[in-house]
Image (cartoon, rainbow, N blue to C red):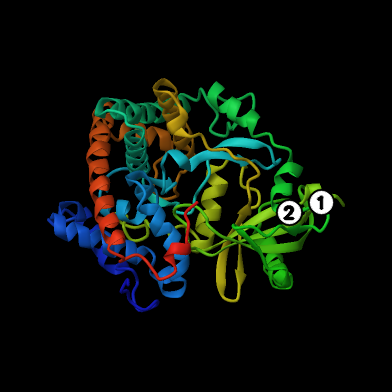
Amino acid sequence: MLQHRVAGSSDGRFDAFRNFARARAEGQILLPPTALGPEERRLHVRQTIIDDHDVRIAYRPEESAPKFKLLAQSPYQFFRGTALLCFRDLAGTDASLPKIITVGDVHPESFGVLPNEEGQPSFGIIDFDEAYVAPFSWDLRRGAVGFNLAARENGDSKKRRARLVASFLEGYRKALKSFDRQERDKAQRFVVGNSPAMIDHKLEACALDHKVFLMELIDLEKRAFRPSDEIAPISDQVDVFQAAIDGYRKNCHIDASGRVRDFRVRDVAIKKRSGVTTQGQERFYVLLEGISEESKDDVVLEMKLRRDSVLRGLIPRDQQFAGDELERVVNAAQIHQLGGAPFHGYASIKEHDFLVREKSPYRGRIDLAKLDRRSAREYAQICGDCLAQVHARSDVEGDVSTRTTERQILTCVDWDTFSGDLVRFAEAAADRVVRDADHFRADYDDGIFKWKNDEKAKPE
């Protein structure tokens, strides 16, 4: 049985790691988590995972069980669900490099298809929950490790892993150079007819009829969610959620006349078995009445319980977003998604805060495991391009000169050396993730991260 502190009695070692990050940035000689011995590292991995899930463990431990089971499946799944562990290893590093509004959790599956302001498919970054002001290199480091681990999972050799990571970094550099020479518009989106062939085909395949998407979730005649293993309707709570949506409407970026008429809530459901990072984190689906009288125009919103970014307190000379934690993700989405986040906002229910966004009707991720090696490198380069566009749009007031962000990034390092260093970093860090995943899996097999009803829990 997992032993943990009572929720509210700990700040997840926030102050300790903030002080560590500041001291390391000032050049003091300290022992970072990456320098721990095998036994100390095992305990660090366990405690960091507990820190990252302490509220969920305290209040709903049975709902965290599916996530822990998923983390035990492979090093890549472990990496995807343990961003806090990754960034605690980076605490205080790269202090001299330009800081921007980073994505915060870059990996091969953080790129995909979302609806733009017209509801049409567009390709790019799809998750900004961890967005934070940090050195630009932190996105590149996590992304590089993610591509290395994905290649390992596909059985690629060390040389092929290096080529895949190098393709990701080269796509990033080429795009930044293009923006710097003003050969490309930083507001250009990857949409049908305006994308590399691989992405164009994916976008065309995603052009699913909205009615078909709704039919998978909703009884269109009743305008109500269909019960399933993943969806539990709570129709008796419509009035509670209507009040929350009325508040959300005030900070929502969408023109109410565009996709919905009066933000009228037709039904509500609990969404179970969410993504790797958010397993066990409370989430709801809300059905809004669309612009017409017909149910085929209705819109489904996701409401996800707010959590602080895992980067909080780890940044050299930590900077905060303007506004509060709720505004952090919404602001990042508006900057980064090029008009593709019209429903992003936030709402409150009984003193709990939720991030709100449209449930995407598109199954829009590209499975790296299904690509041949040449296509995989092409995809990695496209992802680097997308990340560069996000960074180029992420000027942080007070932290940049009169030069553009892309110029600052391009001139702050020797890129050939920097890229080579990142390829080697990715290999070494991925080796560490494999060892960390082994530590976790041993703890998991020993029952440390299990509960009595864990045998009922199934991962996605």
- Which residue type does callout 1 highlight? Ser
- Badge 2 density bin: few <14, some 14–19, many ≥20, Cα 10 Å: many
Q: Residue at x 42, y 30 (%)?
A: 380
Tell me if I can see residue 92 in this picture.
no
User: Vertical placement of 259 versus 414: above or below?
Assistant: below
Which quadrant does the N terminus fall into? bottom left
What residue is shown with label 2? Answer: 218
Q: Residue at 44%, 54% (x, y): give it.
A: 277
Q: Which image quadrant is residue 441 in? A: bottom left
Q: Is residue 444 left or right of residue 283?
A: left
Q: Determine crowd level at label 1: few under 14, some 14-19, many 20+ residues with C-alpha closer than 10 A.
A: many
Q: Which mark is residue 444?
A: none
- Judging from the image, what secondary structure is the residue with disc 1 in? helix
Labels 2 & 1 near each other (Cβ < 8 A): yes
- Amino acid found under the numbered disc labelled 2: Ile
Q: Is residue 458 visible?
A: yes
The relative height of residue 460 versus residue 269 in the rendered view (above or below) is above
The residue singled out by tag 1 in the image is 295
Say left or right for 26 vs 71.
left
Where residue 207 sits: x, y (%)? 68, 34
User: Is residue 271 toward the left or the right of residue 77 in the image?
Assistant: right
Snapshot quadrant of residue 250: bottom right
Q: Secondary structure at mark 2?
A: strand
**Towards the viewer: 137 or 260:** 260
Residue 206 point in image, percent of width and height:
64, 34
Q: Residue 48: x and y, percent? A: 30, 62
